[in-house]
Image (cartoon, rainbow, N blue to C red):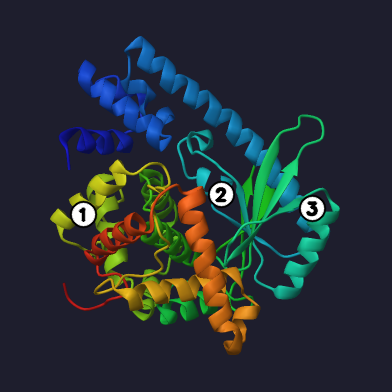
């Protein structure tokens, strides 16, 4: 990890403006810190440290945009959830303004879209019908865990995206992890909690389940394209605020069953060592410090939600080696994503494999503007990177 990377991470821990004024950065440090803040959408947290006029103005502009966007997304969230509540459709609000409430100021967390989880299939059908009759327009998006809707406010013409989840995260190649996620977040198991935000009670995941969800949300991003520092900030602030309500022994059991214990360990250790996780939270959990530094260096290098380059291939797991069989396994999973219903018929698999491969080649050369060789080489390199954390492997390091 570069010294400026470490400096950037250390500054993120300090959100007290009084303490910030006592920290003096050199012009070169201000340049680097500003670039990282803009890349990771952490300008509001870093603004007190930057006094160079042009850099300060850039961070200030992003901060204004984030504050405005927060209030717009908060209004959109209320529109969606109150519509579901009025029609007695049970839902769970994921991330968004519920996580922003953990920040010193909620507006300091970047918001993108609104994520709603509906675990009951019948309720999901009712929600789809209700949304589409209320001006929400379905969008075509290839996903194995959510439907996408766009809503445009008639008066302003401003459009927002709603992701309607029927699974909390996408599928992994590692089936035990899929089974456990389905079990933990099934309509028979999950009980929503309530969180009051802006004088409205939103249905959210209970703290233990939400911690496990946040872990899998990070893992899915990490396997595919990496993630930025914001998700670690979310995790740190959420645990600091809710640790007394989290059943950590249950988290350990779930991690053991889904074989993501090492990933949990590196997340906890990194957040404790660098981002201000309270020292008594999971104090028995530790991971190799050198590995944590490499892990954080990659995260700082990534953009806000990872480096989804044009050559990135979907990665749903980690493999000992990358060969034709590995690529076939990934392609088979994408076939099920693309054809969730037809994929249940084994007799159709050969045809669906060919269609999936054709679509992959078309997207590779026409949309991503890259080559098959480059894509597979990047997939191999990313897999080697993921293997360093022993994901889906509970063996001793």
- In primary-sequence order, the first of circles 2 and 1 is 2
Q: Is residue 143 left or right of residue 36?
A: right
| Coordinates of residue 237 in the picture (x, y in percent) | 40, 48
- In primary-sequence order, the first of circles 3 and 1 is 3
Crowd band around label 1 with a 10 angstrom C-alpha radius: few (<14), some (14–19), many (20+): many
How many numbered tags mark residues here?
A: 3
Crowd band around label 2 with a 10 angstrom C-alpha radius: few (<14), some (14–19), many (20+): some
Residue at position x 77%, y 62% from top? 128
Q: CA distance from mark 2 to mark 1?
A: 28 Å
Q: CA distance from mark 3 to mark 1?
A: 43 Å
What mark, if any, has residue 292 been given in the picture?
A: 1
As helix, strand or loop, the secondary structure at mark 1 comes to helix
Query: Does 146 sit above or below residue 102?
Result: below
Residue at position x 72%, y 65% from top? 90
The reply to whether residue 307 is visible in this rendering is: yes
| Coordinates of residue 41 in the picture (x, y in percent) | 43, 35
What mark, if any, has residue 98 been given in the picture?
A: 2
The reply to whether residue 169 is visible in this rendering is: no
**Residue in the foreground of this view, choosing between 203 and 367:** 367
Residue at position x 33%, y 71% from top? 260
Query: In this view, which residue lies farthest toward the right?
Result: 133
Residue that label 3 marks: 83
| Coordinates of residue 166 in the picture (x, y in percent) | 63, 68
Q: Quadrant of the C terminus?
A: bottom left
Q: Is residue 202 left or right of residue 106?
A: right
Residue at position x 40%, y 78% from top? 174
- Comparing labels 2 and 3, the label whose residue is closer to the camera: 3
Query: Does 323 sit above or below residue 71?
Result: below
As helix, strand or loop, the secondary structure at mark 2 comes to helix
Q: Quadrant of the N terminus?
A: top left
What mark, if any, has residue 53 been given in the picture?
A: none
Q: CA distance from mark 2 to mark 3?
A: 18 Å
């Amino acid at each position: 990890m570069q010294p400026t990377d470490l400096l950037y991470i250390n500054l993120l821990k300090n959100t007290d403006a009084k303490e910030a004024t006592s920290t003096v950065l050199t012009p070169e440090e201000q340049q680097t810190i500003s670039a990282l803040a803009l890349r990771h959408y952490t300008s509001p947290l870093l603004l007190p440290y930057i006094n160079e006029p042009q850099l300060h103005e850039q961070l200030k502009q992003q901060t204004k945009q984030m504050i405005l966007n927060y209030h717009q997304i908060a209004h959109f969230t209320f529109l969606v959830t109150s519509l579901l509540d009025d029609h007695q459709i049970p839902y769970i609000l994921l991330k968004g303004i519920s996580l922003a409430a953990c920040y010193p100021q909620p507006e300091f967390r970047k918001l993108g879209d609104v994520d709603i989880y509906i675990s009951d299939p019948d309720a999901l059908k009712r929600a789809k019908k209700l949304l589409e009759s209320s001006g929400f327009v379905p969008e075509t998006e290839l996903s194995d865990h959510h439907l996408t809707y766009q809503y445009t406010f008639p008066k302003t013409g401003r459009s927002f995206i709603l992701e309607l989840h029927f699974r909390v995260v996408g599928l992994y190649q590692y089936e035990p992890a899929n089974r456990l996620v389905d079990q933990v977040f099934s309509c028979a198991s999950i009980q929503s909690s309530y969180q009051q935000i802006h004088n409205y009670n939103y249905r959210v995941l209970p703290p233990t389940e939400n911690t496990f969800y946040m872990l899998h949300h990070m893992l899915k991003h990490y396997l595919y394209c990496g993630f930025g520092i914001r998700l670690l900030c979310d995790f740190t602030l959420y645990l600091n605020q809710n640790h007394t309500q989290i059943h950590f022994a249950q988290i350990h059991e779930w991690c053991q069953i889904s074989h993501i214990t090492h990933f949990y360990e590196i997340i906890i250790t990194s957040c404790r060592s660098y981002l201000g996780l309270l020292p008594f939270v999971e104090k028995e959990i530790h991971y190799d410090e050198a590995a944590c530094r490499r892990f954080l260096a990659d995260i700082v290098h990534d953009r806000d939600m990872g480096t989804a380059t044009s050559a990135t291939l979907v990665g749903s797991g980690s493999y000992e080696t990358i060969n034709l069989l590995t690529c076939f396994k990934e392609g088979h999973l994408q076939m099920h994503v693309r054809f969730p219903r037809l994929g249940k018929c084994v007799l159709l698999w050969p045809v669906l494999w060919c269609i999936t491969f054709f679509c992959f080649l078309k997207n590779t050369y026409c949309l991503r503007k890259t080559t098959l060789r480059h894509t597979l080489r990047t997939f191999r390199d990313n897999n080697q990177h993921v293997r360093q954390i022993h994901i889906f492997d509970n063996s001793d390091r």
